[in-house]
Image (spheres, coloured by chain):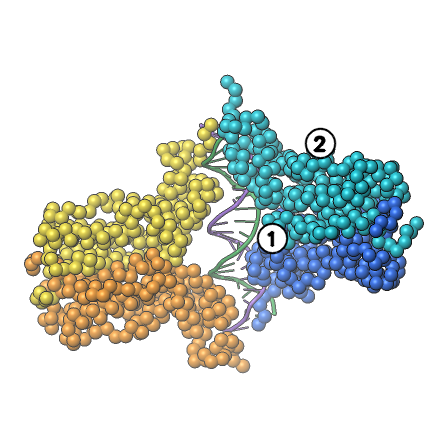
Chain colours: A blue, B cyan, C orange, D yellow, E green, F purple
DNA sequence: TATGAATGAGGTTTCATTCAT
DNA sequence: AATGAATGAAACCTCATTCAT
């Protein structure tokens, strides 16, 4: 009555549909090797499934990649846990440290996924079209700006600063900490190592500035 | 009898070796279309040279790409001109603005080149192995940190700040300003538009910080 | 408990067996798009039936196609109506005109169906093996020859002519009027347009001949 | 100095370019098996050449097929030799017999080639765009009509007959003689056998007509 | 040494058929 | 008996690299 189930689902993985199984397999590969050089055959093999199945469930490679990318971002964000979104709780320093740690880990995990797709706008626009709560990790900047503004409202940050500028610098610093390792050790790089104390220094810098005295 | 010269060199371009000619052609393509989807045939055609020559001068596509990438970064940096390396000259604000403008332009120009290669560690390690004075645009951070330290020595920036942290944030902000356009508008994106006043806000923020009062 | 019925038969189409339902669906597609590029999935979808059913009722795609082709020829002939089989009725000219009109319409309708199969002898021999009263439209020639012979017997056509030869020429002319449009305008060609008066000229020619005087 | 030659050309077939070699190989297959089910691999194998070569010489499979089809028609026409184009020479009967023999042989040879392409309009329009003197065998009808008109001018055929109609019937008869064998014995059919005397009967019929007396 | 055609592995996709449910 | 997802061979095409000339 019901149609046949894929061998891969029959033994053990029975809880999900093959569609989900395929997305999960692709996500696994993305998280392992990034998005570049990923072939349909790789994905089918990882899913232990025939080459052609994917076309029973997706319009093509591109749709699957977009969905897997989405799943990857979601997985990473789930693993990283909540951001300190409630202003006023804890110290600002601690909260900023949390944002930075989050940003470094997030970018380390998702940049290899996006990198291989810069040249494939179709996948990226499919991705952009997905219901995408937090999104591309770009959401981080928005979230951070929101947090900063809330702290401003509470008086724990100065009123006159441009929170967008601050958020840009902080999130940018996370990129900057991740990129070199990505470029020069490959996606099989050791987990990013931020020198001890460096995050503290970032936070101090952003809070106090580097100028000799307050201008303006 | 001297060995045959490539047709492309015979007329007009006689000053360079074919090796240099090929690197230049590849660089031209990289700067036009980025690194993704670039075939050796494209390069040979751009160089007006037979498909196979490249193997007489390079170990393979990868070596040529690494060298062309290097040339590309050098070209971009040459075109962008000098950075305010002499501390003490002009105002710190102006100098920081110059660094940021430089960084945005630099990353906008070189990120499409690197993007297509994140997944090809071979090219990137060849690149990393090149005698690479300024390098990957990562040089920018080093240069900026040096500048900041010099200003510290002159007393125009506070002694206790970690200039590495500051440089990381500033250069990171440049990444952050460039990346989204790259990802979601393709490499045929409009030239990056930083909102007016935003660079000023970045500078102000980094100089003054965002905290309510100086800590530490 | 009787065996399950296909969904498509349950509502409304209950009069036929699923076998007949499938043949009808395939015939519909053949008459719409010809035989080329027809997939079993197309047929199943047209029949609103699961992909696999067809293998419960036919040896495979080929048998189904052969039967659908047969049905298609039958349908077309039914729609075209009766041929003037009774010699002596009407004028010979009118009757020949009717045969030609019939032949043109018949070939226009069935040639796209056969065209996609010339290269698939299996289907065609299955088709040829079917109890095939009128057959492949080749029946037309037989019918026409029969009619001509009957008119001969009535003295309305000359005794000594070879009715097979005449029938061959007349039916052949129908092919010839249909083929070019088929080849060079695709099966989405406009319905065959025979220039006005041309059928008359064919009839006149076949009746009177083209020679200057009766030979033999 | 010159590039490498294909292995297949090196031993023995050296006179032609690989482009010609490929067209010839495809033509060979077309003449053997018709056009349907012909894969690029088949062609490459027949040409004893690597799978990918064809794309160095043609835009794709379609262009090659169109050219091979063209070559096939040319070959067949060359082998069949000249048609009696000079009116007035020989007897009209003999000339018509020659046309019919030619037409039967021609269609027997080229119809399997065209049949497989009815569903691929792209190939057919490429073919139609080729410089195509005689063309698709459709040229035969034009040539025959021309010949008939010339005989009319000489008074060997009656003035008032529509030569187009006559040509249509005669060429159509050739189709009709060829088609059934094609459909029901496959392209590996025995060479078409026209019953002895049948061609004579066709000629007699077309010259004298079948009517009891000259009408009009 | 330059040439550029030849090579062939490997990419994405289609589709007739099978088969667990 | 019906279902429809799974299967996997095979289609067309690309492209880095080789190599006879």
Query: Residue D100 got which mark?
Result: none
The residue located at (12%, 60%) in the rendering is D160
Number of numbered markers: 2
Q: Give coordinates of residue A33: x percent, y percent.
A: 68, 49
Query: Which corner quadrant of the image does residue B118 belong to?
Result: top right
Residue located beneath label 2 in the image: B131
User: Does residue A119 appear anywhere in the picture?
Assistant: no
Residue at the spot 22% in from the left edge and 58% down from the top edge:
D168
Q: Residue at x 43, y 71 (%)?
A: C25
Viewer-proximal residue among B5 and B134: B134
In this rendering, position of residue B156 left or right of residue B81: right
Left/right of residue A188 with respect to residue D23 in the rendered view: right
Q: Position of residue C55 (x, y in %)?
A: 47, 67
> For the point 57% across and 72% down, which residue is it?
A1
- For the residue pair D172 and B212, the one nearer the viewer reads as B212
Query: Around disc 1, counting alpha carbons within 10 Å, would you say few (fewer than 14), some (14 to 19), or many (20 or more)?
Result: some
Residue C31 x %, y %: 37, 67
How many C-alpha atoms fall within 10 Å of the one at disc 2: few (<14), some, or many (≥20)?
A: few
Quadrant position of the N terminus of chain C in the picture: bottom right
Residue C91 or A214: which is nearer the viewer?
A: A214
Residue B148 % position (x, y): 82, 40
Q: Quadrant of residue C138?
A: bottom left
Q: Pointer 1: what residue?
A: A121
């Amino acid at each position: 009555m019901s149609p046949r189930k894929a061998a891969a689902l029959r033994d053990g993985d029975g809880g999900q549909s093959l569609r989900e199984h395929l997305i999960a397999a692709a996500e696994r590969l993305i998280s392992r090797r990034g998005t570049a050089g990923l072939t349909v055959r790789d994905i089918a093999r990882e899913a232990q499934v025939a080459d052609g199945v994917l076309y029973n469930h997706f319009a093509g490679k591109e749709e699957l990649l977009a969905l897997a990318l989405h799943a990857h971002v979601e997985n990473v964000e789930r693993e990283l846990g909540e951001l300190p979104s409630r202003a006023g709780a804890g110290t600002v320093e601690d909260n900023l440290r949390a944002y930075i740690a989050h940003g470094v880990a997030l970018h380390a995990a998702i940049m290899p996924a996006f990198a291989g797709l810069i040249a494939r706008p179709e996948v990226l626009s499919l991705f952009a079209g997905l219901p995408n709560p937090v999104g591309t990790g770009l959401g981080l900047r928005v979230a951070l700006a929101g947090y900063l503004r809330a702290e401003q409202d509470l008086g724990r940050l100065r009123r006159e600063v441009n929170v967008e500028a601050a958020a840009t610098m902080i999130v940018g610093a996370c990129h900057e900490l991740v990129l070199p390792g990505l470029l020069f050790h490959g996606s099989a790089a050791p987990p990013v190592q931020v020198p001890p104390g460096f995050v503290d220094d970032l936070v101090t810098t952003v809070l106090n500035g580097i100028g000799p005295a307050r201008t303006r």
